[in-house]
Amino acid sequence: MKKPILIATGNQGKAKEFQQMLGEEWEVQTLADLENPIDVVEDGETFAENAAKKALAFVDQFEGPILADDSGLEVDSLDGAPGIYSARYAGEAKDDEANNTKLLHALEGISDPERGAQFRCVLALVVEGEVKATFDGVVRGTILRAPRGENGFGYDPLFLPDGFNVTTAEMASDEKHQISHRGKALRDAVDYLQRL
Ligand code: ITT
């Protein structure tokens, strides 16, 4: 029997990645499968606070375990921005292309060695109405000067992970999951869930 799990996200890019990574053993639902999912206001000061808030918002609508992902890009030379504001960096429209354009402008004049950044993902796991644990994953890389690749979502076309000469938007999805912030956090969350 497949195990039900709710991934409390409305982001189609994330939803697809969770579906690919969780595989056959799980019956993955996302907010698109709920009737009238509420729009959670992400007003926490940290990824962990926002992730917990998003997971707890749906306890009345789903019986099984709930995972919520709060994630973003932390750029060294921008003191960690856009960070928790990554989705809305260029405004409330959550437009990936506009976000990437704004990031390139913000890094104009920044030399290659100073273009370090990391993706961070924090997952909050809610079981029986309570946050049982949070899981953190980070992948380091560099911000390019022009987008490359069609895969993934968000800032992937600008992100060259350390040790690779392809962006996370040029990688096959499996390759991205092996090294990604989300892949790392999710493998720990699944280990934890299997031991509950
Ligand atoms: P939900 O809250 O519904 O999950 P959201 O898009 O609002 O969706 P976040 O507040 O966590 O989610 O923002 C995450 C943003 O960080 C996302 O929109 C991208 O801009 C960026 N991001 C996170 N993970 C990424 C990845 O794997 N590749 C590229 N960009 C990523």
Image: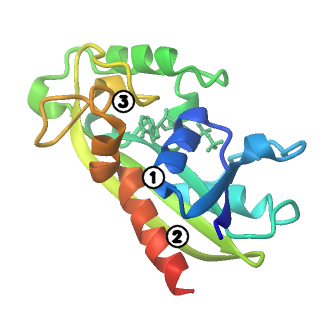
Q: Quadrant of residue 16?
A: top right
Calculate the distance from the C-alpha at mark 3 to the C-alpha at mark 2. 24 Å
The answer to whether residue 127 of the structure is visible from this angle is: yes
The N terminus appears in which quarter of the rendering? bottom right
Residue position marked by numbered label 2 in the rendering: 134
Q: Residue at x 27, y 32 (%)?
A: 171
Question: Amino acid type of disc 3?
Answer: Asp
Residue in front for this viewpoint, 48 or 191: 191
* Lower sequence index among marks 1 and 3: 1
Residue position marked by numbered label 3 in the rendering: 156
Q: Residues within 10 Å of mark 2 (few under 14, many from 20)?
A: many
The label shown at residue 90 is: none
Residue in front for this viewpoint, 58 or 87: 58
Residue position marked by numbered label 1 in the rendering: 21
Most distant residue in the bottom direction? 196
Q: Residue at x 33, y 17 (%)?
A: 104
Horizontal side of residue 184 vs 195, given as left or right = left
Q: Residues within 10 Å of mark 1 (few under 14, many from 20)?
A: some
Calculate the distance from the C-alpha at mark 2 to the C-alpha at mark 1. 18 Å
List x then y, in percent, for residue 42: 68, 47
Question: Foreground mark, 2 or 1?
Answer: 1
List x then y, in percent, for residue 105: 35, 14
The C terminus appears in which quarter of the rendering? bottom right
Most distant residue in the front direction? 1
